[in-house]
Each structure stands twice: as C-alpha cells, then as structure tokens.
Amino acid sequence: MFTNVRFITSATNRKQYPEEGVCEFLFCGKSNVGKSSLINALCNRKRLAFVGKTAGMTRLLNFYSTGQNIRLVDAPGYGYYEKKKNDINNFENIIREYFQYRSDCKALLLLLNIQRDVDDQDEMLLDMAAEYKIPAVIVLTKADKLSNNQRASRISKLAQQLEIDKQDIHVTSSESKQGIEELYQLLVDLSQES
Ligand code: GDP
C-alpha cells in the first residue's frame, strides 16, 4: 500500500497541473462506484479522497503524491446526477485535456461496480484513452457484495462486454481488501516500465 500520501492540488486545466516528471494514474468511475473508498484503501487512509467531495471540488482533478515516484489523480465521478449535457461535455473536456497534454499519465484506471453493466460514459472514457494511446486498467469494485459464483459470472459478463480477457480484470473490495495489495503492486510495476 501507499503509506505517505498527500493531497497536492486540484486542477480543471493544464495550467493548474502540478510540476511534471512523476508517473500518474487517473482514477475514473461513476459516482458511487466506490472510487474514494478504493483510493483510501490503496493509501491505508480513512478519509483522504473524501475531502474533495465536500469542498465543491468534485468538478476537478485532484492530484495526490504517494511518497514514491507515483501520483494518483482522482477524476470527478460521473453518471447518475449528470443529466445535463453541459456537465457531460465539461467532464469530457477535463479528461481529454489531461490525456492529450499529460505525458506523465501512465494509465487510466476505470472503476466499474461488479454488479452493474458497462454504460455509455464508461465506453466513452475507454475510447478516449485509446484515442490518446493511454492503457486502460479495468478495476471492479465492491466484490464483497457477491458470492464466489456470482462474482465469476459477473467477471465473465463484463469481460465479454469490454471485449477483454478475464485475466485482465482486477477484482477489488475496499470492504474486505480483496485485490487491494495486488492493485498497488500493479501500479508500482507499471510505473517502473519505461
Ligand atoms: P465514490 O462516489 O465513487 O467515491 O464512492 P464511495 O467510495 O463514496 O462509495 C460509495 C458507497 O459505496 C459508500 O456507501 C461506500 O461505503 C460503499 N462502498 C465503497 N466501496 C465498497 C466496497 O468495496 N464494498 C461495499 N460493500 N461497499 C462499498
């Protein structure tokens, strides 16, 4: 786990990003997918990633340093509450600008609730990452909510929807801590690839 995580700054555009030169992972997912809980679990903290939720910073990218050569970048949650086209466009623009101009971005971590199907906005993010040649890591959340059998069948279904191999899906639970240490290790490994 990351043990020395600190909030650096929030940004909506590239002028506000922190200094370059550190490998970054962008965390995206629908509101309520469990993104804050996952980031907190990865960092062994309780309320780190919840700070932005209460301070009107939910329309921003929040950058965290980890004490290692890795930064975590928390994107605004999307979905459920965003019926307005403006909000969706605004979100898309923030992410597009980040992918386009941030050469430090090593991968998109797309979080999906293990109990829900992939939707248009999830697909839009995957397409955008592909467009800018950013690798995508699929992370399923809330795995503790299902039995082993249900879990296996959901993983198969989602792999099919995403047209990827089951082995490439990372199954996690912030509640039981399943897959958290493995995800941490994956980020460390990816950060060390040239
Ligand atoms: P965010 O909106 O994506 O940041 O989601 P949160 O981390 O705030 O989580 C949304 C809700 O899902 C909260 O009630 C969490 O307690 C719950 N939750 C998050 N992760 C898990 C998990 O791994 N297992 C279970 N059972 N609930 C979770």
Image (spheres, rainbow, N blue to C red):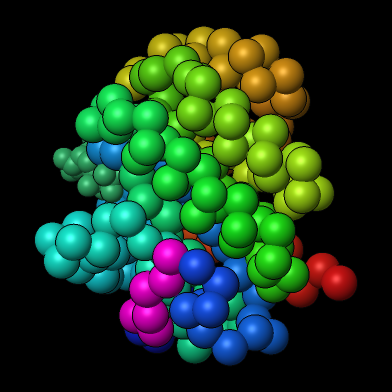
Q: Which residues are magenta?
A: 7-12
Is residue 177 in view?
Answer: no
Residue 41 on image: x %, y %: 34, 60
Q: Is residue 12 visible?
A: yes
- Give the position of the C terminus as an image quadrant: bottom right
Q: What residue lies at 30% left-to-right and 29% top-to-bottom?
A: 84
Is 120 colored magenta in this rendering? Answer: no
Which residue is at the far front?
A: 86
Instruction: Look at the picture and state if 191 lies above or below 67.
Output: above
Please identify the quarter of the rendering in which residue 104 is found.
Answer: bottom right
Inspect the magenta stretch and tell me whether residue 8 lies in it: yes
Q: Is 163 left or right of 151, judged from the image as shown?
A: right
Residue drawn 45% across the image and 32% down it: 112
How far from the left and from the top, in percent, is residue 108? 61, 51
Q: Residue at x 52, y 30 (%)?
A: 122
x and y percentages locating residue 32 in the rendered image: 26, 37
The percent position of residue 24, horizontal first and vertical second, equals 60, 69
* Residue at image coords 42%, 25%: 114
Main SS of residues in magenta: strand
When the figure is inspected, residue 193 is found, relative to residue 78, above or below; the finding is below
* Quadrant of residue 61 within the rendered picture: bottom left
Q: Nearer the viewer, residue 51 or 153?
A: 51
